[in-house]
Amino acid sequence: MNQLTAEVARMGGLAEAQVADAVDSVARRDIALARAVVDRDARLDAMHRDIERKAIRLIALRQPVASDLRRTLASMKLAVDLERTGDLAKNIAKRGLILAEGDPMPPLTRSIERMGKLVSMRLRDVLDAYAAAEVDRAVAVWNTDDEVDEHYNALFRELLTYMMGDPRTITAGTHLLFMAKNLERIGDHATNIAET
């Protein structure tokens, strides 16, 4: 059981790093970092499969009950959310690779960076709450879901205004819109983890 919890914690650490590095690669137009994020996604996928396999084996062989069963099932659910978080971070990095080749959009890139820091903080907080089994901290993260949604809506409006003002920015702006949506979805996964 403790080994499973430790593996989820390691997976959470990698997912956190993936989100932070993906956003950082966009902000700094760092092609090497973006490629590293894309490449590391396979590790998260493998960790997810490994956690799921071990949890199923634990259930089959040890037949845990009560809190042990709940922790085992929670580990499986968290692994799914963390794997999807990694996929979203990979998508952000891929779009960052495309943007790195074009003209910079500093004000909007900074908005993505701010939203990314907020989402990264929520993910870190909820994973810390899970590791420490602190329900109150998890509830606090769950209660801040609206803050991420508000950031997304504001950024969406900002990007649309920017693109309408200069149609040459539509391609880059569209990539940034998808990045913002991916960050909003990562925030939703943090909320899912808090609910677990």
Image (cartoon, rainbow, N blue to C red):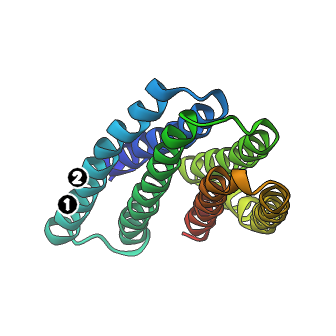
Rate crowding at label 2 as few (under 14), some (14 to 19) or many (20 or more) other CA atoms within 10 Å.
some
Residue 101 shown left or right of residue 112 in the figure: left
The three-letter amino acid code for the residue at tag 1 is Arg
Residue 60, horizontal then vertical, whole percent: 16, 71
Q: Secondary structure at mark 2?
A: helix
Judge whether 171 appears above or below 99 on screen: below
Between 151 and 119, which is closer to the camera in this rendering?
A: 151
**In the rendered picture of this protein, how many numbered marks are placed on residues?**
2
Rate crowding at label 1 as few (under 14), some (14 to 19) or many (20 or more) other CA atoms within 10 Å.
few
Residue at numbered disc 2: 50
Residue 193, horizontal then vertical, whole percent: 55, 63
Residue 70 shown left or right of residue 152 in the figure: left
The three-letter amino acid code for the residue at tag 2 is Asp
Judge whether 119 appears above or below 103 on screen: below
Name the residue located 71 percent from the left edge and 66 percent from the top edge. 142
Residue 12, horizontal then vertical, whole percent: 47, 46
Residue 29: mark: none
| Distance CA(mark 2)–CA(mark 1) | 5 Å
Q: Secondary structure at mark 1?
A: helix
Judge whether 146 appears above or below 36 on screen: below
Between 74 and 62, which is closer to the camera in this rendering?
A: 74
Name the residue located 43 percent from the left edge and 60 percent from the top edge. 84
Residue 75 shown left or right of residue 191 in the figure: left
Query: Residue 29: which quarter of the image?
Result: top right
Between 143 and 45, which is closer to the camera in this rendering?
A: 45
Quadrant location of the C terminus in the rendered image: bottom right
Query: Residue 30: which quarter of the image?
Result: top right
Check contact, mark 2 vs mark 1: CB within 8 A: yes
Residue 53: mark: 1
Residue 175, horizontal then vertical, whole percent: 59, 54
Name the residue located 49 percent from the left edge and 38 percent from the top edge. 97
